[in-house]
Amino acid sequence: MSKVLTAYFSASGVTADAAKKIAELTGGSICEIRPKVPYTQADLNWQDKNSRSSLEMKDKSSRPAIADGDAPVSDCDVVLLGFPVWWYTAPTIINTFLESRDFSGKRIILFATSGSSGFGSAVADLKSSVSDSTSIEEGIVVHGRQGSDVWKKWIASLGL
């Protein structure tokens, strides 16, 4: 069995709930990707063109600082990387995380939470933040909070 790390960024708690269930089911490590400056409700207002999240997502080179955290990347073979879908892709803080560590030779499988959209351009947008020897794959997008059955079925399908 592969050594699995579940790493996640969560703005509202939905992705955090999913990540905790996934980590429990895989028996692997878990790591929260926390912004150095936490997001406020106003920062997350996607209807405001000048909100922090809107400005970050408009600028593909934006790399929000992350708070120091221990992510045992070197100890794992597979990283299950979770985030809420923002503007049909991963929040740019995910790029910050990927660029701050060496994922060479790792298999990264994405999972996401969303109100209604899919991964969009997430794989392409994240691929530029890792080495060519790193695999990034679409995993699963769920809409709203899900029970453990959804996660059990998905994890079983991964062949870990």
Image: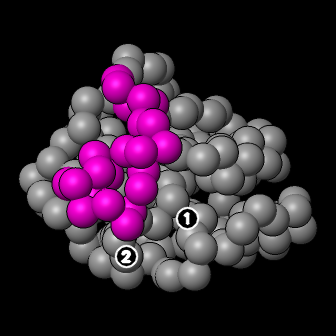
Q: What scheme was used to colour the molecule?
A: one colour
Q: Would residue 75 appear left or right of 115 to someone viewing this image? A: left
- State the residue at coordinates (66%, 73%): 142
What label does residue 112 carry, if any? 1
* Residue 118 image offset from top left, x and y in percent: 50, 81
* Residue 112 image offset from top left, x and y in percent: 55, 64
Distance in Å between CA atoms under marks 2 and 1: 11 Å
* Residue 127 image offset from top left, x and y in percent: 24, 64
Nearer-the-camera pick, 71 or 159: 71
- State the residue at coordinates (57%, 70%): 114
The kind of residue on which mark 1 rests is Ala
Q: Would residue 112 appear left or right of 40 to someone viewing this image? A: right
Does the magenta-highlighted stretch encompass residue 43? yes
Q: Which residues are magenta?
A: 34-55
> Is residue 2 something that shows in the picture?
no
Label 1 sits on a secondary structure element that is strand
The kind of residue on which mark 2 rests is Tyr
- State the residue at coordinates (15%, 48%): 62
- State the residue at coordinates (49%, 43%): 41
Q: Quadrant of residue 55?
A: bottom left
Image height of 37 relative to 22, above or below:
above
Q: Main secondary structure of the magenta part?
A: loop
Label 1: how many Cα within 10 Å (few below 14, some 14–19, many 20+): many
Image height of 43 relative to 147, above or below:
above
Does the magenta-highlighted stretch encompass residue 50? yes
> Is residue 139 something that shows in the picture?
yes
Label 2 sits on a secondary structure element that is loop
* Residue 37 image offset from top left, x and y in percent: 35, 26
Which residue is under mark 2?
A: 88
Q: Would residue 103 appear left or right of 115 to someone viewing this image? A: left
Image height of 116 relative to 26, above or below:
below
